[in-house]
Amino acid sequence: MTNETLNSDDGSLTNVSLGASMPNSGVIPVLTQTSNLSPSGHPIKRCLVESGLSFTGNVTAEGTCTIAGNLIGNMHEKASGELQVVISESGNVQGDIYASKVSVMGACQGTVDASGGSVDLHPNSVVKGHIRYGQLQVNSAELNATLERSTEKKNR
């Protein structure tokens, strides 16, 4: 067997025979998940599709989800929580959105289902498809959709 010299954390050198087990370093690196806490002490849940990123697939989430890139697929609210979707000015969604609150500043094509919740369409937003809402606010948006008012929250 040949020997190999290793530097340890304290700067000392250790000879180890190749093929033998590594010496105990005493420290094992561990990845830990960190989260921000709200003032009430609950974790803040967020997801983001960044500008320049294109994501194809279905998303099931809770908390706030911001779409600044492209999403091709459906977004569903987790049964245990509420989902707020924000489509930013650079965001584009092609698919269905099932959430408690939807705010569109970019483009969206498909069904937007915020039954019992709210949908806000901001200036310069482009929305095509079907919108189901409890409350609807339209501010100079390009809207080509069927509107359906639904005050009861449906299973998403």
Image (cartoon, rainbow, N blue to C red):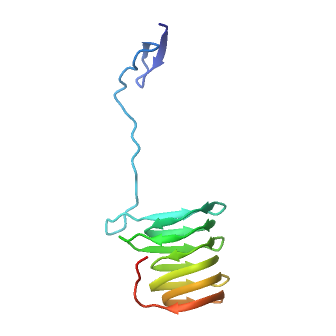
Does residue 78 sit above or below 23 in this rendering?
A: below
- Point out the image quarter for the C terminus: bottom left
How many marks do you count on the picture? Answer: 0
Across and down, in percent, residue 103 comes to 54, 79
Task: Say left or right for 93 vs 154.
Answer: right
- The answer to whether residue 105 of the structure is visible from this angle is no
What residue is rendered at 47% in x and 7% in y? 1
Across and down, in percent, residue 138 comes to 59, 90
Residue at the left extreme, as displayed? 40
What residue is rendered at 67% in x and 61% in y? 52
Task: Say left or right for 153 vs 52.
Answer: left
Residue 100: quarter of image: bottom left
Across and down, in percent, residue 37 comes to 37, 63
**Is 129 or 123 nearer to us in this picture?**
129
What residue is rendered at 41% in x and 82% in y? 154
Across and down, in percent, residue 81 comes to 37, 71
Residue 12: quarter of image: top left
Task: Say left or right for 39 vs 47.
Answer: left
- The answer to whether residue 81 of the structure is visible from this angle is yes
Does residue 130 sit above or below 93 in this rendering?
A: below
**Is 9 or 30 nearer to us in this picture?**
30
Residue 74: quarter of image: bottom right
Does residue 22 sit above or below 32 in this rendering?
A: above
